[in-house]
């Protein structure tokens, strides 16, 4: 197993709790048994281990003991092994992950961020014209009245598009209750992380108010069993890099579905190999809802041409054997 450092410049800074980052840095993991396989470990501050911890874990990694690794490192090794296994079987990665169906595309959402009413409406209208079946707006940075006004403008701009909101834990319980009442009136499908991630009980109490509760950070903090026990979610946002690999993401999606919870797959603004793997994860989930996979334009210079480009609101699912067409370091040097 080989481990090589990389740095991919972003087209615009990525805001994190630890400050803005301008490059996505990590490690490519390559294996050659039972076939060539490439994995990507791209840690993200606040979500996974640090870059330094990721490197240390990869240098000492035992491919036969993946669960001893922190999440980004585990993702890198697991993806390399899964890629190799799928190539050896002669099937695309999504079929190796658990489905014999052929899936050519998966629906994706557009992210329109946070802006004033007019700009929000214009961005949502453009996303709808581009074929996106769903759009996600950031909320919580402005007053609740301002956010509700933005949501109303978005709905007027695109009456038939699914609207989602992401509060990043910004609201108190009373604010969230008021927000849900207002958002329900505009047909918002779900709010991602309305409360602080620690408050599973509060999230459980928000359910049934006409807008679904989606958990992201809370899933990572508490784990699936705790979320299910608390009855805290209608939707789970699954980030394969944060969960520790495509295999864990698919397993979590299956368990969520079994509990009546919808999975939505997203990236952590990763490079082409991890991004393609996230598309394969989504393809392995039958009838998946629009996912947060339209992030390739956030990377200014990537390893390879986008293996899962987005067209008309859908990401192409790679159909070659394994994860992508690349089989060796020479393919992305």
Image (spheres, grey):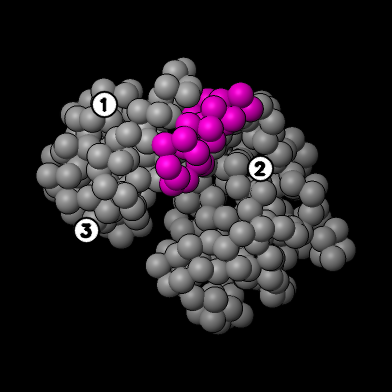
Q: Which numbered disc, 2 or 1, marks the residue that appears first in the sequence?
A: 2
Front residue of 23/261: it is 23
Circles 2 and 1 in contact, beta carbons < 8 Å:
no
Judged from the image, the secondary structure of the residue bearing numbered disc 2 is: helix
- Most distant residue in the right direction: 330
Distance from the alpha carbon under mark 2 to that under mark 3: 35 Å
Judged from the image, the secondary structure of the residue bearing numbered disc 1 is: helix
Q: Which residue is mark 3?
A: 198
Q: Quadrant of the N terminus?
A: bottom right
Residue 92 shown left or right of residue 61 in the figure: right
Which residue is at a point 40% across and 45% down the rendered structure image? 138
User: In front of the other: label 2 or label 3?
Assistant: 3
Point out residue 307 in the picture as x, y percentages from the top left corner.
74, 44
Point out residue 287 in the picture as x, y percentages from the top left corner.
50, 25
Q: Quadrant of the C terminus?
A: bottom right
Q: Which residue is mark 2?
A: 93
- In magenta, the rendered stretch is 111-135
Which residue is at a point 33% across and 23% down the rendered structure image? 187
Point out residue 215 in the picture as x, y percentages from the top left corner.
32, 46
- Most distant residue in the top direction: 160
Circles 1 and 3 in contact, beta carbons < 8 Å:
no
Residue 297 shown left or right of residue 113 in the figure: right
Front residue of 145/170: it is 145
Judged from the image, the secondary structure of the residue bearing numbered disc 3 is: loop
- Quick check: 74 above or below 283? below
Distance from the alpha carbon under mark 2 to that under mark 1: 38 Å
Q: Total number of numbered labels?
A: 3
Front residue of 147/262: it is 147
Q: Which residue is mark 1?
A: 184
Q: Is residue 63 magenta?
A: no
């Amino acid at each position: 197993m080989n481990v090589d450092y990389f740095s991919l410049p972003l087209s615009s800074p990525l805001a994190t709790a630890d400050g803005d980052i301008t490059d996505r840095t990590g490690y490519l993991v390559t294996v050659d048994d039972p076939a060539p396989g490439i994995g990507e470990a791209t840690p993200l501050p606040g979500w996974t281990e640090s870059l330094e911890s990721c490197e240390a874990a990869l240098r000492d990694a035992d491919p036969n003991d993946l669960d001893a690794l922190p999440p980004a490192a585990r993702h890198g090794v697991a993806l390399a092994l899964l890629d190799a296994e799928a190539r050896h079987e002669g099937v695309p990665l999504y079929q190796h992950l658990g489905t014999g169906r052929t899936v050519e595309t998966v629906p994706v959402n557009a992210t329109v961020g946070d802006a004033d009413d007019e700009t929000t409406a214009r961005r949502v209208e453009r996303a709808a014209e581009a074929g996106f079946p769903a759009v996600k707006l950031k909320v919580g940075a402005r007053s609740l009245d301002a956010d509700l006004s933005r949501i109303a403008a978005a709905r007027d701009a695109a009456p038939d598009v699914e609207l989602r909101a992401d509060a990043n834990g910004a609201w108190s319980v009373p604010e969230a209750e008021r927000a849900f009442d207002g958002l329900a009136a505009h047909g918002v499908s779900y709010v991602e992380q309305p409360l602080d991630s620690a408050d599973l009980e509060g999230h459980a109490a928000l359910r049934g108010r006409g807008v679904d509760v989606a958990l992201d950070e809370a899933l990572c903090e508490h784990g699936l069993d705790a979320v299910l026990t608390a009855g805290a979610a209608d939707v789970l946002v699954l980030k394969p890099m944060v969960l520790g690999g495509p295999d864990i993401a698919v397993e979590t999606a299956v368990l969520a579905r079994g509990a009546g919870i919808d999975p939505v797959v997203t990236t952590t603004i990763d490079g082409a190999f991890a991004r393609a793997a996230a598309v394969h994860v989504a393809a392995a989930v039958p009838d998946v809802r629009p996912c947060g996979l339209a992030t390739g334009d956030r990377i200014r210079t990537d390893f390879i041409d986008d293996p899962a480009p987005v067209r008309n609101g859908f990401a192409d699912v790679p159909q070659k054997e394994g994860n992508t067409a690349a089989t060796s370091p020479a393919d992305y040097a």
